[in-house]
Amino acid sequence: ERKCILTGDWQNDLGSNMTISAVNGAGQFSGLYLTAVSATEKPILVSPLNGSQHVDNLEQPTFGFTVKWSFSDSTTVFVGQCFTDDHGKETLQTMWLLRDKAKSMDDNWNATTVGTNVFTRIKVQNV
Ligand SMILES: O=C(CCCC[C@@H]1SC[C@@H]2NC(=O)N[C@@H]21)NCCc1cc([N+](=O)[O-])ccc1O
């Protein structure tokens, strides 16, 4: 079957890493996100994430999560789906919205960026 539970370590096409904790019975999870890139001069720090996935049917579930950046006044929401190929390899196909903190309502139009990221599992090297 093509079941997917998001718990574990993931890396995306930008080289960002995320660790998702246990997914509870309601599909809720939390975790940590370390972005490889940012639009600020500030040093990048690990940031918390919270989200949920469908668990009623674990077949290639959809999910969403929010990252509240710890080094910037901005927020990103990711939404996507976990796909499992014939070899059991899982990928997370996502789209995101990055909301910058606009200085004023006049700048509101220019404060949201959209993009895509694909995540694959980081396999723990066999020790
Ligand atoms: O940089 C960040 C936080 C890290 C975002 C990383 C993204 S999240 C989607 C993608 N996937 C992924 O892994 N990493 C990237 N916030 C923008 C800061 C900012 C910039 C400007 N500005 O540049 O004008 C103005 C106001 C602002 O608050």
Image (tube, rainbow, N blue to C red):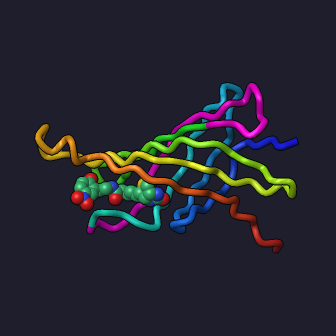
- Could you say where residue 81 lies in the image, as x and y percent from the top left? 64, 42
- Could you say where residue 10 lies in the image, as x and y percent from the top left? 63, 58
Q: Write down which quadrant ligand 1 falls in.
A: bottom left
Task: Decide if residue 41 is on the left or right side of residue 27.
Answer: left
Task: Decide if residue 65 is on the left or right side of residue 44.
Answer: right
- Could you say where residue 2 lies in the image, as x and y percent from the top left? 83, 43
Where residue 52 sits, quadrant-wise, is: top right
Q: If the image is split into quadrants, where does the N terminus sit? A: top right
The residue lying at 52 percent from left, 63 percent from top is 16
**Residues shaded magenta:** 41-62
Q: If the image is split into quadrants, where does the C terminus sit? A: bottom right
Vertical position of residue 103 compared to residue 34: above or below: above
Vertical position of residue 44 compared to residue 25: above or below: below
Residue 44 covered by magenta stretch: yes
Where residue 55 sits, quadrant-wise, is: top right
Vertical position of residue 78 compared to residue 34: above or below: above
Residue 86 covered by magenta stretch: no
Please name the predominant secondary structure of the magenta segment in the image.
loop
Task: Decide if residue 103 is on the left or right side of residue 53.
Answer: left
Nearest the camera: 74 or 21? Answer: 74
The residue lying at 56 percent from left, 47 percent from top is 31
- Could you say where residue 123 lies in the image, as x and y percent from the top left? 74, 65
Task: Decide if residue 119 is on the left or right side of residue 77.
Answer: right
The residue lying at 28 percent from left, 49 percent from top is 100
